[in-house]
Amino acid sequence: MKNEQQRYQIGAREESGRYPVRVDGKPAGCVYRRHGSWFPVMPGHRMDGRSTYRYGAAELLVAAVDQGKRPTIPVQAARPHTPRALDVATRSSYTYLIPDLRPTLPNVVRAAEAMARLAELAWKPLAGYPGADQPWMMQCLLCGWEGRRFWSHLRGRNGDGIPRPVNRHPWCLPVADHAELIAKHSTGLTDTCECTAFRHPTRTYGALEALTVLKRKYEKESNRQGLFFSRAILEPCTASSARAVALREALDWALAL
Ligand SMILES: [Zn+2]
Ligand SMILES: [Zn+2]
């Protein structure tokens, strides 16, 4: 009996928990395990089916290839990025989150709002807010992917609040699972600051105080320097949404003072 040759190779586990799979020697996608089952992923295609075994999921990729399907995004490019220049060292500090915008109170508040919304959508900013229409380096908290996204695409258009695009980024977990995963992720968010190292304002008065301090710094020192005092506003906090609301409420007062 002819022993049919295995047509797939499963690569080493990636940081995101996925295993890249090659079929007939070419990148075909990946497999990952969730809730005790193995799922195949081929970028650009909806993949039905799952298996109890990793190998079973890889066989589903072989079947897809035999149906003429190929990954539509170069698999190499779609792999999670490895952390680069803005580095682990700077990431422990909030200063990497200083917006890449003219240093004004409204811009700092906009940055805090955008970062709060990112947290609600299970994204982590890896750089300061660059404005709505500039590429922004961030990490997908559902799968660990890192890359550049446009805030204007993520926040939804015309203020309807619906995040777009539906596909978060190439190579993410299946879209059908996103709502559940995002909901799970957002259980870690709180209404009040529970940070121990620093108290972040989540009420209007506290936000006004933080903005006033920053405003004074702007007036007295160079703008750049002033930004380094915006820890209260920019530092990651589980209550970032409440903080953003408070900052927005306080902004007009702070500008008028
Ligand atoms: Zn993702
Ligand atoms: Zn906090």
Image: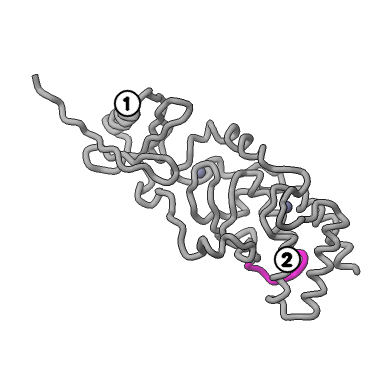
Residue at the left extreme, as displayed: 1
Residue ID for mark 2: 230
Snapshot quadrant of residue 39: top left
Where is residue 255 shown, x and y percent of the image? Answer: 86, 67
Query: Which image quadrant is residue 222 in?
Result: bottom right
- The CA span between labels 2 and 1 is 52 Å
Magenta region's main secondary structure?
A: loop
In the image, residue 257 lies at what x, y percent? 91, 69
State the residue in front, 110 or 203. Answer: 203
Depth check, mark 2 against mark 1: the one in front is 2
Query: Label 2 is placed on what type of residue?
Result: Ser
Residue at horizontal 60 percent and vertical 34 percent from the top: 179
Indicate whether residue 103 is drawn in magenta. yes
Spot the residue most to the top: 1
Tag of residue 56 = 1
In terms of secondary structure, where does tag 2 sit? loop
- Compare marks 2 and 1 and give the one earlier in the sequence: 1
The segment highlighted magenta reads 100-107
Disc 1 within 8 angstroms of ligand 1 (CB): no
- Identified at 46% across, 57% down, the residue is 83
